[in-house]
Amino acid sequence: MRIIPIDKVKPGMVIARAVIGSKGEILLSSGVKIDETYIKRIKEIGVPALYIRDGNIGKVEYDDVISEQTRQEALKVTKDVMNSVRLSSDFDFKKVKKVVDDLVSELLTSKDLLIALVDMRAANEVGFFHGVNTTVLSVITGIAMGYDTKKLGQLACGALFHDIGTIMLPPELMKKQAPLSAEENEQIMKHPELGFNILRKKEGVSLMSAHVALQHHEKYDGTGYPRGLAGDDISEFARIVAIAAIYDNLVSIGVEAKRVLPHQAIEHLTLYSDKWFDAQILQVFIRTIAVFPLGTVVLLNSGETALVTKVNKKYPTRPVVRVFKNKGGRRVNPPFEIDLAKNQAYFVQNIIIDDEP
Amino acid sequence: MRENIEASYETICREICRKLDLHCCSIWFKEINRQQRLGYFEKEGSTDDLTISNLDFEINKHVLEHKVPVVIENLKNDKRFLGVKTIPLSVRANPILHDNSVIGSITFYNQDRINEVLRDVIDSIAVELAFGLEQLQYNFTASRQKKLRKELNTARIIQQSLLPKQIPEVQGITLGVRFIPTYEISGDYYDFIITDHQNLGIVVGDVMGKGIPAALLMGIARTITRSIARHDLVPHMALSEINSSLFPDLSNQGMFLTMFFALYNPQQKALLYASAGHNPPIILEGGSEKIGLLKSRGIFIGGCPKLSYNLQTRKLGSGDLVIFYTDGLTEAKNHQGEQFGVERVAEILKEYRYCEVPAMLDCLTMRLMQFIGDREQSDDITFIVLKAE
């Protein structure tokens, strides 16, 4: 399984991890052989890269931080909630509570894991997938900050629905691409308050969670909206979600159809530390990210080309890599693995984005 | 040519397995601190099960590092390399020696016990391979630098073995170091010294010049610095002493070296330092993100018989980052001939300041290597990162 940018994907390649649409629907299942039509469609919706099987390198086994089932369930519940809110301004909290509890307890049992995978998805659509990813990232950060289960549940609920207010805005507006007019911008900037109003009235939803919807666009230096709150006046949950949401958008969608790699996202977030983000939380957050996600092709200082097959929580820049090309560019068959955490003479010299299988 | 050589080692492994009815065979080539697999064959091997292929890396690493054969009667009972997994195979891994130094290794895996007859055959194969591997070593290096001879290579190995293998653990700070040598011998040098009073001495130096003389001088400088630094001499005095001791040898050869000497006191969280014409380390303040240089005036070692240096002191605050380096880092050039520069290093440090020290080193290294790109690295690169908690 390796990450291939969309312009290098060729007919005949086999999908190694399902491609999921912004609404959580499966666009292409794992195991599907890609043809020209699929490639065209994936390009159209703007997915920047795919996970592809590579028989020459072999299988990559991984434990996802949450099970596929829970992820699907979370997507489904989010979708139901959004639909229900649109129709009746109300939703069934019991279902939400269950999926949030499942998510938190699964993450608590897998707390040694890093976010090892990056799921690329289509740009320019507000969807549910972003909510679920943001939740996973936020809860992992919360765990690292020592939160108890109750707080994690409230954080998760807030993260999952931080953008719920957008459902009250005209769908055409949400689909519209930048640049937006001043009026349109003003309208979009209402979504935190709209979301807050939906959540705060709901029985069972903690006011702490509702505040995430209200404050996730506030910035640490007070330049955000809707209220221009600064520093600790912004709720801690909202400060976590603000970081997680931006990170997810950066790595999953990319910028102008170009993938943003995790280390670049780290650079970007750090640049805005203390301006947009709480530096203390950012520091915790950054340490939960695998700098080289699974399936990344890297060039080692030995000149060998290798695939990242296992991430290391303690040393996020020292994964286990599988060497599949020697320094002369010749295939190493079968490949062999080097644990960079145990072999300090080796390091990653570069990330190879355009290596072709 | 190279393509053919590589293909022929694959063939050798396959033929050995066929003729001797072995399960698997591999040949590795030793590089400094690293290893390269030249040939590998595994009966019914598949990319879906890399157990032996992965294990093979570890076994050969052991052989190449320790210069001793590895003999395992049955992998089932051996936890050294495999951990939890077990495979019913016996193993014999031999170093391949030339002129009494290890240049490679060859490993055999067999379903049955490796008996004496087979062992003798295996041992003689290892001997036979020595010549070919030695040739290969010459071929590989010849393309990089024609003049490089075996002696140079040995000198390089000895020189690198003089650098500290372990980074000391000191209360209140985290340290990390990255050394990226070129294919030639040059004079980058660093050291960590725990003093009699439990202070930490940090030394970064650069011998001006290349080749064996530079390597020899580095060795001498290291020994002298260690013995002087051990007794908690303040940095400016230490540099003066080092200069007096080294001057006669240096002036005879017309050589000199730059050196930065810092003494960290864990009780007072203070860094005392002096510089002998060395690049000033960069400091990034944890609280304010302000970037500064640890400047201190002083002439390089070997300039005059008697020299005095300036002592500077800096208290380290929580989150402060200091990077000590040699000019190889800031003067690394990209394709356009542009230098990496102090500003870029500082900027990158800022961007990764929330990462732990090992990750910071790796990210800075990657950004540096991306900058250098295809251009050949022209000088040793050394940098040490110190982060105050």
Image: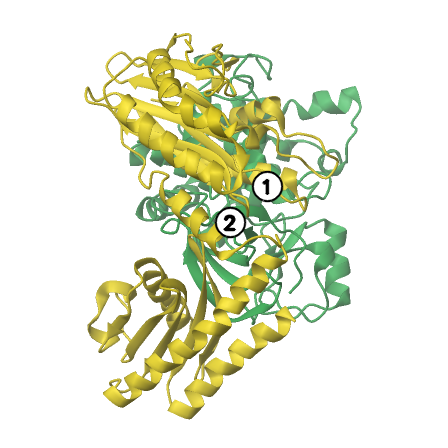
Chain colours: A green, B yellow
Q: Please say if A225 is above or below A315.
A: above
> Residue, x 19% and y 19% (percent of image)?
B197
> Residue, x 34% and y 28% (percent of image)?
B174
Structural distance between the alpha carbons of marks 2 and 1 = 20 Å
> Residue, x 42% and y 52% (percent of image)?
B33
Q: In front: B357, or B271?
A: B271
Q: In front: B236, or A12?
A: B236
Image quadrant holding the C terminus of chain B, namely top left
Please, what is the three-letter code of the amino acid marked with disc 1? Met
- Disc assigned to residue B369: 1
Badge 2 local density, few (<14 within 10 Å), some, or many (20+)?
many
Judge whether residue B353 can be spotted in this image.
Answer: no
Q: Please say if B350 is above or below B163.
A: above
Please, what is the three-letter code of the amino acid marked with disc 2? Pro
Judge from the rendering whether residue B233 lies leftward or rightward of residue A240; answer left or right.
Answer: left
- Residue A338: x and y in percent read 42, 58
- Residue B117: x and y in percent read 27, 90
Q: In front: B20, or B160?
A: B160
Q: For mark 2, name the chain.
A: A
Residue at the spot of label 2: A293
Judge whether residue A114 can be spotted in this image.
Answer: yes
Q: Please say if B47 is above or below A293.
A: below
Judge from the rendering whether residue A47 lies leftward or rightward of residue A81; answer left or right.
Answer: right
Secondary structure under the numbered disc 2 in the rendered image: loop
